[in-house]
Image (spheres, rainbow, N blue to C red):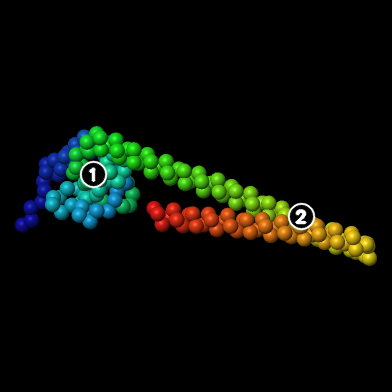
Amino acid sequence: MPSWPNSNETSNDDDEYMSELSSMNMEYFQTPYTVIDPSFSGLVTESDRRCILHRERAGKFVAFEGTDTGRRFIGCATEDGVNCGVLEWVDAPWPVILQRCLTKLWDMYHEENLGRVQDKEAHEIVVEKLKKELDSLGNQYSQLVDDVSKLFDYQDGQKSHDMDYTSQTINELKEKKHQLEERAKIEIQMEKLKLKKEQSGS
């Protein structure tokens, strides 16, 4: 005959669960970013430790955030929905001097990332300005072509001096347009190379 848990045993399990949940420090629910460590990963098999909210088998992780970087912990292994966070730290907090070093390194990392973002935004502004100048020049060139066409229709057979002046103006605008196009191409290519270098470096 199978032995079913009586109501008292079920009640005791519920009481234990609620006690564990209520006594849990809320900071544990803030799961840190992690890094893959093959020597400490996967689900916990050494015990039947389960997470608080889902009652699922806990996982093994290595933190990769702030002063906890490198510390191993047992935490909620669910990937969907609410993650109930750290259940237990395997490693004790690092010595104060190491925590200061980690804080400094992370500050440098965030500062460098901020600088890259600002450089990218500044470069995008320059490229956008060049594009606008190029569009404006194209509009001016088109307008000039229309004006010259009308001039030819109205004053066919004018002196060659006037024709030479008009032709020179058109050539100057063509040259300026070409220079802006080349400049914009170079700027865009440099931005692509810079972003590619940053991505390969990270």
Asked whether, in this view, residue 107 is left or right of residue 161, the answer is: left
Q: Amino acid at mark 2?
A: Gln
Distance between mark 1 and mark 2 Cα atoms: 64 Å
Q: Residue at (27%, 53%) from the top-left corner?
A: 36
In percent of width and height, residue 27 lies at 28, 37
Which disc, if any, is residue 140? 2
> Between 171 and 75, which is closer to the camera in this rendering?
171
Label 2, secondary structure: give it: helix
Task: Please name whichever residue, 168 or 129, is drawn nearer the observer in this view of the structure.
Answer: 168
Query: Can the viewer see residue 53?
Result: no
- Number of numbered discs on residues: 2
- The percent coordinates of residue 152 (x first, y second) are 89, 63
Is residue 1 rendered to the left or right of residue 68?
Answer: left
Check the image and report above or below for 49 versus 197: above
- The numbered disc on residue 71 is 1
Q: Earlier in the sequence, mark 1 or mark 2?
A: 1
Horizontal and vertical percent position of residue 199: 43, 55
Q: Nearer the viewer, mark 1 or mark 2?
A: 2
